[in-house]
Image: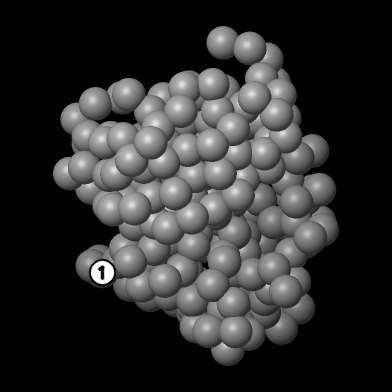
Amino acid sequence: MRIAVLANGAWDLVWGKQVLKEVDFLICADGGANYAALSGYLPNLLIGDLDSILPENLKQCANAGCVIERYPSEKDETDLELALCRAVEQACFAGQTDIWLYGASGKRIDHFLGNLALMLAYARKGYRIRLVDPEHEMWILQGREEIRGSFGQKLSLIALSEKAIVTTEGLRYPLQQGVLFQESPRGVSNVFLGAEAVIQVHEGWVLVVLPKDVGMV
């Protein structure tokens, strides 16, 4: 079961129609519902202060029986924060730890940085928020993971904690319990040597960024 949250960031319509086909339970954070409707989908749940959704799309959601949670505009949480909270509840009910996040990059850089903070908060609780857009996939890692890629594809590892101790296999620039510091971009633009790489974060938290372009650096 794929549980996804659609935010109000940048949206590519052709790409969006394809990824939403794979979603089993869709939560839209306010204006994210505009993108869903434009792509031919309606959310199972619409949440936020609803100051960005178009009136006709709000009416369409209501008529279709979507669950709608409206909050005041003056609140401590962002609309996406509220949406992720509901997504985690749904994931817990389904016995899952992965949540897909769309429309959460582009447009405002302050929102994007806030979204990364939410991803880290949920990673510490044992949930993996997979932020995906047409050009990237990114998630936060602690522990060991095998990552599929292709020869020459780039992969970046960015420390989100003060430091992270990392071992890698299958990348051009290997680390053997190497230290990535928060203030250094040392882990940016590594390169797959084949179709798979293994990343182990022994200590700390690392943002894995997997660009979807293929080609040597």
Q: Could you tell me which secondary element the residue under label 1 belongs to?
A: loop
Amino acid, disc 1: Lys
Question: x and y percent of residue 128 in the render?
Answer: 49, 62
Q: How many marks?
A: 1
Circle 1 sits on which residue?
75
> Residue 37, image x and y in percent?
73, 57
Q: Which residue is depicted at the point 38% across and 28% down?
A: 187
Furthest residue in direction front, as rendered: 176
Q: Is residue 19 left or right of residue 84?
A: right
Image-based side of 69 in relation to 17, left or right:
left
> Which one is nearer the viewer's eye here, 146 or 55?
146
The residue nearer to you, when weighing 190 against 73, is: 190
Residue 115 in view (yes/no): no
Q: Is residue 114 left or right of residue 34?
A: left
Left or right: residue 81 compared with residue 133: left
Is residue 99 placed above or below 194 in the rendered structure?
below
Residue occupying the point 62% across, 27% down: 192
Coloring scheme used:
one colour
Q: State the residue lying farthest toward the bottom.
A: 93
In the rendered image, which quarter is residue 101 located in?
A: bottom right
At horizontal 47% and vertical 38% (from top left) the residue drawn is 168
**Percent x, y for residue 53?**
55, 58
Residue pictured at 41% horizontal, 41% vertical = 167
In this rendering, is residue 78 above or below 87? above
**Residue 2 drawn at (x, y percent):** 69, 68
What quarter of the picture does the C terminus occupy? top right
* Position of 50 relative to 186 (above/below): below
State whether residue 98 appears in this view: yes
